Every structure is written in C-alpha cells, then in structure tokens.
Amino acid sequence: MRRTILVLVLAAVALIPGLSADAAAQAVGYWKSISDVKGEEGKVTALWKLSLDGQGQLQGTIVWTPKSGPDAKYESKKPEYNGLAVRGTFWMKGLKKAGSDGWNGGTIVDIGNDKADVYGCEIKVIEGGKKLAMRGYIGIALIGRTQTWVAATEAEAQKLIAN
C-alpha cells in the first residue's frame, strides 16, 4: 500500500510543470527573436528552431525571417558563410547544458549584415519557459548584449513558415 501511494505521489509530481522537467530542456523548440534595435523594438526578426545535436549540445537554425524567402542565400564578406541558405543553416551551435536553466559555451553568427560576426553565446530559460534570454558576446559574457526570445507554438511556427 505504501509503495502504491509513493508511486502515485511521484507520478503527480512528475505532471506538475517545472518540477519534473529540467528548465534547460525547455529551450528545445521554436523561438521568435525580437528586435531591440531603436525604432524596430518589439518586431519579430526571425523564427528559430532550437534542437539537440548528436552530442546533446543545443543548436539553432533560422526557419523563417520576414525579409527573406525560403530559398534566400546569405551574402557575406566572409567566404565560409557566403552563399549559405538563410533558412536551415545552423547559425547557433555548440551550447552545452549549464545548470538547470541554461546553456553556454556555444557560438552564434549574426547574419543581420554582411559581416557574419561570430559571437560567444549563452541561453537562459526564463519566465517558466515562455522566454529565453539569449546573450551574444565577444570574449567574455560581460561584454555583450542580451536579446529576449519568445516561445512560439508549433501552430505559430507552421503558419509563419508557410508564408
């Protein structure tokens, strides 16, 4: 009887969001990056799909942008990035799990211009998995900028991708 009660209690706890799952795992999915540039604040700049690679590291690809179609190629002064597909290329990679709510040690390529600057990258799941704090930095995390990304449902993602 005690064993049955224990199993039921553990099962109930497992169903309570935030108690059973590691918050860092909530980073996997679709995310809308939101502009923090003056005059563009609040606009969705891209839809990202974050996933785990074969080594369990977090990686991200852009699956939609408001300014480029599905076949758009990135034009860069850096030959290693020039001509890559805007959608489908892993622009973020190598993030390792850090604690219960984040990822760090990875890189992200800024494709907002033709320079293809590569930044260090760390992500923290915030607001119960509704948002991400994505920080890009040069050298050390203290020298950088944090963008807030907002979770997107599968339905929202498919609607944007279809356009």
Image (spheres, rainbow, N blue to C red):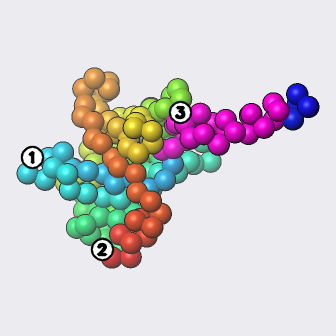
Would you say the residues marked 3 and 1 are in contact, meaning their CB atoms lie under 8 Å apart?
no
Q: Earlier in the sequence, mark 3 or mark 1?
A: 1
Name the kind of residue labelled 3 in the image.
Lys
Of residue 5 and residue 129, the one placed in the foreground of this image is 5
Q: Is residue 160 magenta?
A: no
Residue 147 x, y percent position in the rendering? 27, 41
Q: Which residue is mark 1?
A: 38
**From this viewpoint, is residue 143 visible?**
yes
How many residues crowd mark 3 within 10 Å: few (<14), some (14–19), many (20+)?
some
**From this viewpoint, is residue 80 visible?**
no
Compared with 145, 114 (above or below) is below
| Residues at marks 1 and 2, CA–CA distance in whole angstroms | 25 Å
Locate residue 23 relative to residue 111 in the image: left or right: right
SS class of the residue under badge 3? Answer: strand
Q: Quarter of the image containing the N terminus?
A: top right
Q: Which residue is mark 3?
A: 97
Residue 82 x, y percent position in the rendering? 30, 60
**Res. 69 mark:** 2
* Residue at x 44%, y 59% (from the top left corner): 153
Q: Earlier in the sequence, mark 3 or mark 2?
A: 2
Compared with 151, 7 (above or below) is above
Magenta region: which residues? 5-27
* Residue at x 63%, y 36% (from the top left corner): 20
SS class of the residue under badge 2? Answer: loop
* Residue at x 34%, y 54% (from the top left corner): 32
**Res. 129 mark:** none
SS class of the residue under badge 1? Answer: loop
Name the kind of residue labelled 2 in the image.
Gly
Locate residue 159 relative to residue 116 in the image: left or right: right
Compared with 36, 98 (above or below) is above
